[in-house]
């Protein structure tokens, strides 16, 4: 693991403090940890051993310890951060709900407007068809009065 990745993971604790904790864990629990400043790396387990099974457990233990320490040290900061995130989320939710409600209303109005327009066009067509039929009937009536026969 690179030192920069470790610092990002444990950003709440300065690296010097985390380094002391790693040294104590190394001495007390027999975990093999080496910090290579030249390569900017933290090596868990023997330096030549690349077996992931050997590296997994120390990493898990260090991660758990760091999370516990971060929870203890930054309890207030984390709760403030959580509260700010929740407040922002609630604010955003209200804004989004208002925006979506407005969009829904506009869409309903558009649908109603289109429906009314369609009904109006349909009525105009029906009137035109009725007028055309009336004119045809009047024409037939005139022709029949004059002795002509209508053939369609």
Image (cartoon, rainbow, N blue to C red):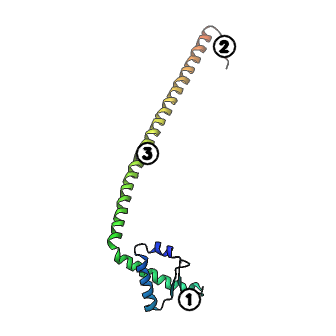
Query: Is disc 1 surrounded by few (<14), some (14 to 19) or many (20+) residues within 10 Å?
Result: some
Q: Could you tell me residue 36's position as x and y percent?
A: 53, 81
Q: Residue extending furthest left?
A: 76
Left or right: residue 73 compared with residue 57: left
CB under 8 Å between discs 2 and 1? no
Q: Could you tell me residue 111's position as x and y percent?
A: 47, 40
Q: Could you tell me residue 22's position as x and y percent?
A: 45, 84
List the residue tagged with mark 2. 149
CB under 8 Å between discs 1 and 3? no
Q: What residue is drawn where x is 43% and y is 45%? A: 103
Q: Judging from the image, what secondary structure is the residue with disc 2 in?
A: loop
Q: Which mark is residue 98?
A: none
User: Which of the marked residues, 2 or 1, is nearer the chain's N terminus?
Assistant: 1
User: What is the quadrant of residue 64 in the picture?
Assistant: bottom left
User: In whole angstroms, how far apart are the C-alphas of marks 2 and 1?
Assistant: 114 Å
Q: Judging from the image, what secondary structure is the residue with disc 1 in?
A: loop
Q: Foreground mark, 2 or 3?
A: 3
List the residue tagged with mark 1. 46
User: In whole angstroms, how far apart are the C-alphas of marks 1 and 3?
Assistant: 62 Å
Q: Which is more toward the observer, 124 or 105? A: 105
Q: Relative to 129, is 81 above or below?
A: below
Q: Residue extending furthest front?
A: 38
User: Which of the marked residues, 2 or 3, is nearer the chain's N terminus?
Assistant: 3
For the C terminus, the image quarter is top right
List the residue tagged with mark 3. 103
Q: Relative to 141, is 79 above or below?
A: below
Q: Foreground mark, 1 or 3?
A: 1
Q: What residue is drawn where x is 55% and y is 79%? A: 38
Q: Relative to 2, is 141 above or below?
A: above
């Amino acid at each position: 693991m690179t030192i920069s990745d470790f610092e990002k993971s444990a950003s709440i604790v300065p690296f010097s403090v985390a380094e002391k904790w790693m040294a104590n864990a190394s001495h007390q629990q027999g975990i093999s940890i080496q910090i290579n400043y030249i390569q900017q790396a933290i090596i868990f387990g023997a330096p030549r051993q690349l077996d992931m099974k050997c590296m997994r457990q120390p990493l898990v233990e260090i991660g758990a310890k760091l999370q516990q320490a971060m929870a203890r040290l930054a309890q207030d900061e984390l709760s403030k951060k959580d509260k700010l995130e929740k407040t922002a989320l609630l604010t955003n939710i209200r804004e989004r709900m208002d925006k979506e409600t407005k969009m829904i209303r506009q869409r309903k109005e558009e649908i109603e407007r289109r429906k009314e327009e369609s009904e109006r066009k349909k009525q105009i067509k029906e009137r035109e068809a009725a007028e055309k039929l009336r004119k045809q009937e009047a024409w037939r009536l005139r022709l029949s009065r004059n002795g002509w026969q209508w053939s369609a």
